[in-house]
Structure formats: structure tokens, C-alpha cells
Amino acid sequence: MSEAPPPAVQSRSSADGGVQTPLSRNIRQLGLFFTGAAFMAASVFVTRRSVVRRQIESFPKFYVSNRSPPRFDSSDRSLLAVQAFGLATLNVMSFGVLLTGGISWGWDLCSMRELRERSQAALRRPGRQGVDPEEEKALKEMMDGLLAKMGMQTPEEGGEGGEKKPEDDKDQS
């Protein structure tokens, strides 16, 4: 009685030409995801700290008169806009890394080469080359029935989208 050999572990070749096991592929994919998650957490922390700092700066000082509105010169506004743009860029990029890691794990991709190969295979996959006349006829009948239920004319009968027929001109005179 000999034992059956363990099932072969499916492995794929990596971008550098080596063979990766499913575990190493998952670790690589989830590593990118968790890196993105850490980057996202850090960017949210930096953004929150910056917003709180700006809120504290906006409170009036004890000795400032409340009769004159605060004045902002154009350099303050420009600096504020540049900082807001930088924080927004940081947040979007960190979300992009998180999304890329999630997609690579969900679709089991480890490299751009794999993505390119799968995209080319999907594009070359034999599919429907033409329109089936029977399906086209069935679709036309279904649409005619739907338009009849709504009380609309089909384009062949001179509806909104159809061309005006010569008989229509005779009815109006």
C-alpha cells in the first residue's frame, strides 16, 4: 500500500523568470496592499494634523479686536492652496497604491507582464464575430411590443426618430 503523492502545487513564473508558489504570490500581492494601507493611514494622519493646525491658527488671539475682520494677503492664500494641493495629491496617491494592491490580489496579478498577457489573451479569445439575424429579429419584436405598450410609434411608422413619409404630408392638407 503506497501513499499517493501530495497534489502538485500550482506555480507560475514571475516577472524575473523564477517560479513562484501561490503563497509567495499572495505575500507579494498583499504586501503591496498593506503598504498602501499603511501609506493611506499615514496620509490621513498628516492631513488631519494639518487641518487641526489650520483650525487652531484661525482662532483669534485674546488681545485682537473683534471689530476688524482678519486680513489674508495673497501669499497666505497661495501657500494654503499649495499645501491643500499637496495633501490632496498625497491622499490620492496613497489610495492608488492601496487600490493597486487590492486589485492585484483580487485578480491574482504579480507583474505588468502578467496583466499584459491576460489582456492579450482576453482580446484574442474567440467570441461573437457577427450579429445573429435571429437574435436581431427577436430584439426588434421585443422593442416593437414595448413601444406598442407605451403607445409610441416605431421609427418605421413615422415616430419621433423616423423620417417623415409622403403619406403624412397628404393627411395635413
Image (cartoon, rainbow, N blue to C red):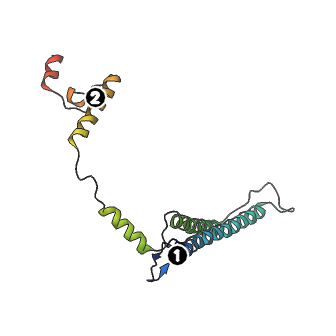
Question: Which residue is tagged 2?
Answer: 144
Task: Tell me, yes or no, whether the two marked residues, 1 and 2, touch with CB atoms within 8 Å.
Answer: no
Q: Is residue 87 above or below residue 130?
A: below
Is residue 22 rendered to the left or right of residue 113? right
Question: Toward the viewer: 168 or 39?
Answer: 39
Which of the image's four quarters has the N terminus? bottom right
Q: Tag 1: Cα neighbours inside 10 Å, few (<14), some, or many (≥20)?
A: some
Give the quarter of the image for residue 49: bottom right
Is residue 13 rendered to the left or right of residue 168? right
Q: Exactly how many numbered labels are in the figure?
A: 2
Give the quarter of the image for residue 152: top left
Q: Residue at x 31, y 61 (%)?
A: 125
Q: Residue at x 35, y 62 (%)?
A: 122
Is residue 83 rendered to the left or right of residue 49? left
Which one is in front in this view, the residue at disc 1 or the one at disc 2? 1
Please identify the residue farthest to the front as the structure is shown. Answer: 1
Query: Mark 1: which amino acid?
Result: Thr
For the residues labelled 1 and 2, the Cα–Cα distance comes to 56 Å
Which of the image's four quarters has the C terminus? top left
Q: Residue at x 74, y 56 (%)?
A: 69
Query: Mark 2: which amino acid?
Result: Asp
Q: Position of residue 31 (x, y in %)?
A: 60, 73
Q: Residue at x 27, y 25 (%)?
A: 153
Question: Which residue is tagged 1?
Answer: 21
